[in-house]
């Protein structure tokens, strides 16, 4: 009578006729009255005891069958498609073929452990398999975050270290401390994120704010990424090689009491000393010595200049009709070649009135409208007008005398009284004639000869002159 061998679920594994055996499974099944069945039965029991321990899996396994993988010393169970570990992850270079939710798989190539979720997501390297760790593959070497406990003088500290290809790039800590023993690149670990100092590591990207700025370098990494040392300091003296533009009319304010301001209003620029009664001083380096060349006195409103005031344009004192100078002299044409120089008074003529020094004549000259004459000097005066005709002006000698060639007197003046003996006025022709009439005569004869007894009448005058 043939045996019908069923699995647990009732399905038939094999039908064995009498006196025969079946090897369609990992065990040897034998029929009724098979000779020598005892050896095969004992071998089947041994296989069950050792879970078919071998470096090769059973050739005809049944779902649920156990196999001890002698090459990995791992107990596996057949899931209907392949043998998978009964505990831990299945190690293989390729993902398991028929996984169940919760199965673990060790990627033997990358040394990474995955869990099967059955949920295929775009971020998963292997569809349905979620990476448990590590985050780096074997070829990438240690990369990613590692939680560590390190020693310090204040006790052990828990930190999170970020590795890239076995190099610790950054450390996250909740407190500041000095690790002991030392960690390369991390002499001190600060609260927050500390970067490896030996790498020159920096944060790159954008941030909305920062508590401080490293100004140790002035080397820009690009035209848009500027080193901290190239920013102007607000807490220390600093230098810029670029222009500074203040794009508002409030302008610039300088001084611990905001004494000086430069501002703009209606495009007019105002430079202001805002401290009461204080000055604005302009200084220069004069041969290595600081010299104040101009002072605007805040208490008086006066301007003091230490040096020459050179004006290339005109000087206009529009608020005053008279300009006053405390100096005894005003020097003109200083430092220039010798040319005529003086004072010009603006008039309605084409050429204004002028008083100037004529260098060609070495004389002061005055006049207006292009008509000028020399000014008289004391040395130009003479007492002898006869010897110096039309060249000099007349002045008395030391004795009070004048000499002229001729003199014409206008017929003016009152008559000379007979009793007047003190007048020094020069008589005119009319006065002399009138004076002659006082003596009773009317004839006045001028001749080169003396009169005879028959000449004239009583009271007449006879003037004898040289021939």
Image: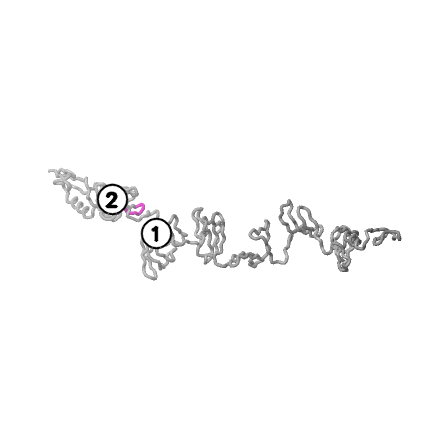
What is the x, y in percent for residue 413?
74, 53
Q: Residue furthest left?
A: 1
Q: On residue 117, which mark appears?
A: 2
Q: Give the number of marks.
A: 2
Q: Residue at x 31, y 54 (%)?
A: 147
Label 1 residue SS? strand
- In space, the residues marked 1 and 2 are separated at their CA atoms by 28 Å
In the picture, residue 16 is in which quadrant?
top left
What is the x, y in percent for residue 71?
26, 47
Q: On residue 162, which mark appears?
A: 1
**Would residue 90 be visible to someone looking at this image?**
no
Q: Which residues are magenta?
A: 108-119
How crowded is the residue under tag 2: few (<14 C-alpha within 10 Å), some, or many (20+)?
Answer: some
Q: Is residue 323 left or right of residue 53?
A: right
Q: Is residue 379 left or right of residue 264?
A: right
Q: Closest to the observer: 448 or 401?
A: 448
Q: Is residue 116 magenta?
A: yes
Q: Closest to the observer: 254 or 467?
A: 467
**Would residue 209 be visible to someone looking at this image?**
yes
Label 2 residue SS? loop
- Sequence-first tag of 1 and 2: 2
């Amino acid at each position: 009578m043939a045996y019908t061998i069923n699995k647990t679920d009732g399905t038939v594994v094999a039908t064995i006729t009498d006196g025969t055996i079946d090897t369609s499974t990992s065990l040897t099944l034998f029929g009724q009255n098979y000779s020598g069945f005892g050896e095969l039965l004992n071998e089947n029991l041994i296989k069950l005891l050792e879970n078919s321990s071998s470096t090769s899996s059973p050739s005809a396994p049944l779902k649920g069958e156990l196999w001890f993988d002698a090459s990995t010393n791992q107990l596996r169970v057949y899931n209907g498609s392949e043998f998978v570990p009964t505990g831990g992850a299945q190690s293989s270079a390729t993902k398991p073929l028929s996984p169940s939710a919760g199965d673990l798989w060790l990627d033997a190539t990358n040394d990474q452990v995955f869990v099967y979720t059955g949920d295929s997501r775009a971020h998963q390297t292997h569809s349905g398999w979620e990476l448990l760790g590590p985050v780096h593959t074997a070829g990438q070497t240690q990369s990613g975050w590692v939680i560590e406990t390190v020693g310090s003088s204040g006790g052990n500290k828990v930190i999170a270290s970020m590795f890239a290809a076995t190099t610790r790039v950054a450390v996250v800590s909740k407190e500041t401390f000095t690790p002991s023993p030392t960690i390369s690149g991390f002499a001190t670990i600060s609260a927050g994120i500390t970067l490896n100092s030996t790498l020159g590591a920096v944060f790159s990207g954008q941030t909305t704010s920062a508590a401080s700025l490293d100004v140790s370098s002035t080397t820009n990494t690009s035209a848009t990424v500027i080193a901290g040392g190239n920013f102007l300091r607000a807490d220390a003296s600093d230098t810029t090689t670029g222009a500074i533009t203040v794009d508002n009319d409030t302008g610039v304010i300088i001084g611990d009491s905001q004494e000086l301001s430069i501002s703009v209003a209606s495009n007019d620029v105002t430079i202001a000393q805002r401290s009461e009664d204080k000055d604005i001083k302009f200084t220069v380096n004069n041969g290595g010595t600081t010299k104040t060349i101009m002072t605007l006195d805040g208490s008086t409103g006066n301007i003091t200049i230490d040096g020459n005031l050179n004006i290339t344009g005109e000087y206009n004192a529009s608020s005053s009709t008279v300009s006053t100078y405390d100096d005894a002299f005003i020097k003109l044409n200083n430092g220039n070649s010798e040319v005529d120089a003086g004072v010009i008074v603006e008039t309605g003529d084409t050429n204004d009135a002028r008083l100037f020094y004529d260098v060609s004549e070495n004389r002061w000259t005055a006049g207006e409208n292009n008509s000028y004459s020399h000014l008289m000097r004391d040395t130009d005066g003479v007492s002898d007008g006869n010897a110096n005709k039309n060249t000099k002006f007349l002045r008395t000698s030391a004795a009070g005398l004048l000499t002229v060639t001729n003199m014409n007197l206008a017929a003016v003046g009152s008559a000379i009284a007979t009793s007047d003996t003190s007048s020094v006025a020069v008589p005119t022709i009319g006065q002399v004639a009138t004076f002659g009439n006082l003596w009773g005569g009317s004839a006045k004869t001028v001749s080169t000869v003396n009169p005879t007894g028959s000449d004239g009448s009583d009271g007449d005058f006879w003037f004898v002159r040289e021939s």
